[in-house]
Amino acid sequence: MSNTLTTSILIKNGRLIDPANNINKLADILIINGKIAAIETASDAAINATIEATNGIKVNDSTQIIDARGLTIIPGLVDCCARLREPGLENKATINSETIAATKAGITTLCCPPDTDPVIDEPAVVELINHKTVNAAHSKVVMLGALTAGLRGEHLSEIYALKQAGCAGLSNARKPIENSLILKRAFAYAATFDMRVFIEPDEHWLSMGGCAHEGKIATRLGLKGIPVSAETIAIARALELVAETGVSAHFGRLSSAQGATMIARAKNEQLPVTADVSAHQLHLTELDISSFNSACHVIPPLRTQRDLEVLQNAVSNGTIDAICSDHQPHDVDAKQSPFASTEAGISSLETLLPLCLRLVQQTSLELSDVIHKITCSPANILGIKAGTLSVGGDADICIFDENEDWQLTTDIINSHGKNTPFLGWNFQGRVKYTLVNGELLFSD
């Protein structure tokens, strides 16, 4: 092998946390041509010895050095639900703008639900999004294909064609499938092709027109509520069909204690299910809408303090497998009407890691456990090779300062959407470097 490295980066003296490989130590990482070539305990002698033994080359003057002393190195974050607004709503955001924002937030892989316009129900739409992602040249994007054609809940989509096109799973997003026979057939077909179904549990007749948790706060504010039963009834129906068809199912964006309890019971019964929660559901409650703060208008709605605490415990005990951003960027006008008339959702790429670190600071959760929920666990759910730092694997890496204090303001939000209830919040822990396929795309 030639002594000249095409491209090489050496990350030195950082604390490496890689839950997938059970690593938590000071380490040096050598990256060659986009791949991780060596990982050794922090020591020039050790890393050089490994390089010479395995590659027949030495670090030379062309190697880019990143001094990670005092910093934490983790796999690039994997976000299992982020709406990028393109195609269809480019006035709110684009694949280019949101993948750049993701990179700067340490997120190297995003999963896009199928409720784009056009819907991701045929390979041509998958190819379009892939093309725009490659042109953006920042964070990677994987997609969920539509479970039914046009998400209309009437006819099954071309499931096999979507799998061949590279979709990581199937979903009907929050669009209803009223006919349980169609839902059962969809699950059965997905199981036949070994595709996971991603479910956002919602009984739409119960939630229709609602904008807040059904309870005392909504009643006092005169807002139409969404009962917990809208979530639990949908979960119950889906679990029955999972048991009958054997399909692997992922329940996304849980919001209630009862929902988490149902998933825990299903896991105890050995059903093939996983679940995630939005980061904001672990920090906000229905009390945060008391002043009609439209930035807190989310679906599913913010629920009670007890729900929040049970969800946090569900993250801790493994009932909830992943934490996602549930990123939904909006233009300014979308949040300026009366609360019930505003559009739901938070622009949340920039707060995914900070809110997870806040859990470590405020609860009994260990840092490695939280990192697990935003790296290898969502990658495993999506069935993709990501979320871990293994020799020979892609060098998708996030490096952050666990101790840096900062405040979230609109001018440092890179997403086109500035709609977040966390403006003015003080956080501890900030991304300093992000690498995607071994290329340093962000440094602070």
Image: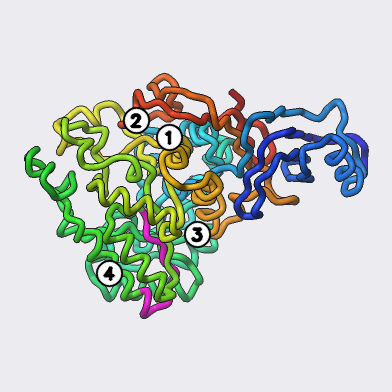
Q: Residue at x 45, y 73 (%)?
A: 191
The quadrant of the image that shows the C terminus is: top right
Could you say whether the residue bearing mark 3 is in a helix, strand or loop?
Answer: helix
Asked if the residue at tag 1 contacts the one at tag 4, i.e. Cβ–Cβ closer than 8 Å, the answer is: no
Disc 1 residue type (three-letter): Thr
Q: Earlier in the sequence, mark 1 or mark 2?
A: 1
Q: Earlier in the sequence, mark 4 or mark 2?
A: 4
Which residue, given by chain and number where applicable, does mark 3 sit on? 381
Q: Nearer the viewer, residue 428 or 29?
A: 428
Q: Nearer the viewer, residue 302 or 386?
A: 302
Label 3: few (<14), some (14–19) or many (≥20) C-alpha neighbours in 10 Å: many
Q: Earlier in the sequence, mark 4 or mark 1?
A: 4
Asked if the residue at tag 2 contacts the one at tag 1, i.e. Cβ–Cβ closer than 8 Å, the answer is: yes
Disc 4 residue type (three-letter): Ala
Could you say whether the residue bearing mark 1 is in a helix, strand or loop?
Answer: loop
Which quadrant would residue 396 be assigned to in this image? top right
Q: CA distance from mark 1 to mark 2?
A: 8 Å
Q: CA distance from mark 3 to mark 2?
A: 28 Å
Which quadrant would residue 159 be assigned to in this image? bottom left
Q: Which residues are magenta?
A: 242-252
Which residue, given by chain and number where applicable, does mark 2 sit on? 422
